[in-house]
Amino acid sequence: MKICNYSEINDDFFKKTEFENISSVNEIIKAVQENGDEAIREYAKKFGDGDIGEFRLTDKEIQSAINNTDKKTIASIEYAINNVREFARAQYNSIKEIEVNINGNILGQKKVAIDSVGCYIPGGNYPLPSSAIMTIVPAKVAGVKRIIAMSPKIKDVTVTAAYLAGADEIYRIGGVQAIAAMAYGCESIEKVNKITGPGNKFVTAAKRQVYGECGIDFPAGPSEVLIIADNNANPEFIAADMLAQCEHDKDARAFLICFSKDFALKVEKQAEEYLKTLPTKDIAKVSFDKSVAIIVNSIDEAVEATNKKAPEHLELCFGDSFDINKFTNYGSMFIGSYSAEVFGDYVSGTNHTLPTNQVAKFSGGLSVFDYFKIQTYQIINEKSLKQTAINASALAFQEGLFAHKLAADIRIKHL
């Protein structure tokens, strides 16, 4: 882990990672568009998924996966589902359908669920049943009619989580070909209106490419955590939380902002101790060695650095009372030493599909709001028509849009 003072940090530290235009991604998408199922099978073999047979899991296969998942794991999955569902319901109910009278006109808004969504569940380095929960449960709460789940080399535990979360269709497809299949459809799969869920750089690039053909949640890069800790924080907690991000993949990053080099060295020493026995050390060590500890002189410097970096996960592990509203750019915040980021990953109830690579400067994380639309309507009656039409006509004239003016004026004549 690199340790440096805040004054030594240059602009490169705060730069976004530019997503490369991966030519192979475009080739795969085009192949799936043109050749459908055949292309999906070919790429599955090419990228190590083997002969995947029928794309969609049968009811018998789903039941077999559930039977093969131990009861303790199922209980944990159900615990997580319940918490995520309750928070999603609270979010959903926070947006009201309204109808108001403004100058005699009736204006309103409705909540309308997206018809169909595709939930991508990574399955590369690790099976991620938690991603099934995070993407499918909010869609179910929003009232999406058709929810499909896709994951490569799908494990029994992921199938179980997807089914219990409420997926209507489960497919054993991954990678760019899965994103293309959901966006454009093929012989075996009907296209969806929106794609959500995390993935590697190829999946992310594919989501960017298909945006417009369907919606996406947001492009996401490697996982990241930024932890602000004072000298009274527990180095064991901090080191564990940093490694929890680092083990995702070799491009993941952990950032520590603290107030003394001695504390940073304590965290580094503890992390190195954990790495001696950590089963995922081959990945975690590479990422941890490239991570950074920044020594600041004040909480204001910590705030400034954090808002510039806009981390995916933000942990606040300091004792002094402080206005947390000064932190404005982050995916999800974890307040206090016991609020480990891992709890948000799995069971606390907030969503773990979060913006990375500074996307948090303009977007929040995945939520129930991603699965429904706010649609407006209006009713212009005869009593309010004249004033409405006169003002609309005047603005249409200023814009030189005379058919617009005509459409307003003709209604006045019929009063």
Image (cartoon, rainbow, N blue to C red):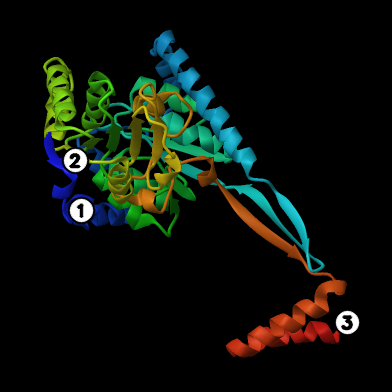
Q: Dot 2: few (<14), some (14–19), or many (≥20) neighbours within 10 Å?
A: few
Q: Helix, strand or loop at disc 1? A: helix
Residue drawn where x is 48% and y is 34% of the image: 136
Kindly indicate the quadrant of the structure image that contains residue 404: bottom right
As measured in the structure, the alpha-carbon distance from the residue carrying label 3 to the one carrying label 1 is: 62 Å
How packed mark 1 is, by other alpha carbons closer than 10 Å (few <14, some 14-19, many 20 or more), is: few
Q: Secondary structure at mark 3?
A: loop
Identify the residue position indicated by label 2 in the image. Answer: 46
Mark 2 vs mark 3, CA separation in Å: 69 Å
Question: Label 3: few (<14), some or many (≥20) within 10 Å?
Answer: few
- For the question of whether residue 140 can be seen, the reply is yes
Measured along the vertical axis of the image, is residue 32 above or below residue 325? Answer: below
Residue 297, compared with residue 205, is above or below; it is above
What x and y, as percent, mark residue 166?
Answer: 52, 29
- Amino acid type, label 2: Lys
Residue at 13%, 41% (x, y): give it: 4
Mark 2 or 3: the one toward you: 3
